[in-house]
Amino acid sequence: QVQLVEFGGGLVQPGGSLRLSCAASGFIFSINAMGWYRQAPGKQRELVAGLSSGGSTNYADSVKGRFTISRDNARKMVYLQMNSLKPEDTAVYYCSVDGHWGQGTQVTVSS
């Protein structure tokens, strides 16, 4: 079955960086688009970044120029490099493929 395991979250000061990782299994990773979503308290889950099997990317306007999504098909991993973090980036971040979700990893941006 599809399994997605996120890790790499934590507490970081404003302006700092984090790299989230997602380990995938149970499906043909290389042919699937992958996405990172986030959900802040009291808000709906939103798409942060998407990456197609062909390498095309799309980002939420709020993270453009600061976040970068990438993938390693050989390792079945997808990453989210987050730079210049802001308090409003605080949320639980989820990896997703084809309607499946990981358990999420908490990112807190605070001084």
Image (spheres, rainbow, N blue to C red):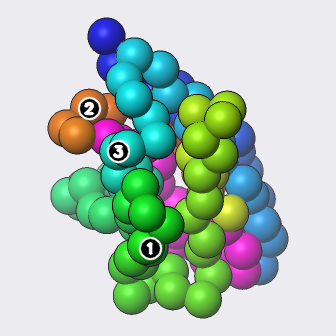
| Secondary structure category for the residue under label 2 | strand
In the rendered structure, the answer to whether residue 12 lies left or right of residue 104 reads right
Kind of residue at badge 3? Asn
Name which of mark 1 and mark 3 comes first in the sequence: 3
> Is 15 placed above or below 33 here?
below
Q: Which mark is residue 32?
A: 3
Kind of residue at badge 1? Thr
Q: Is residue 65 visible?
A: yes
Quadrant of res 77: top right
Name which of mark 1 and mark 2 comes first in the sequence: 1
Task: Determine crowd level at label 2: few under 14, some 14-19, many 20+ residues with C-alpha closer than 10 A.
Answer: few
Question: Percent x, y for residue 37?
Answer: 37, 55
Quadrant of res 42: bottom left
- Residue 84 is one of the magenta-drawn residues: yes
- Which quadrant would the N terminus be assigned to in this image? top left
Q: Which mark is residue 57?
A: 1
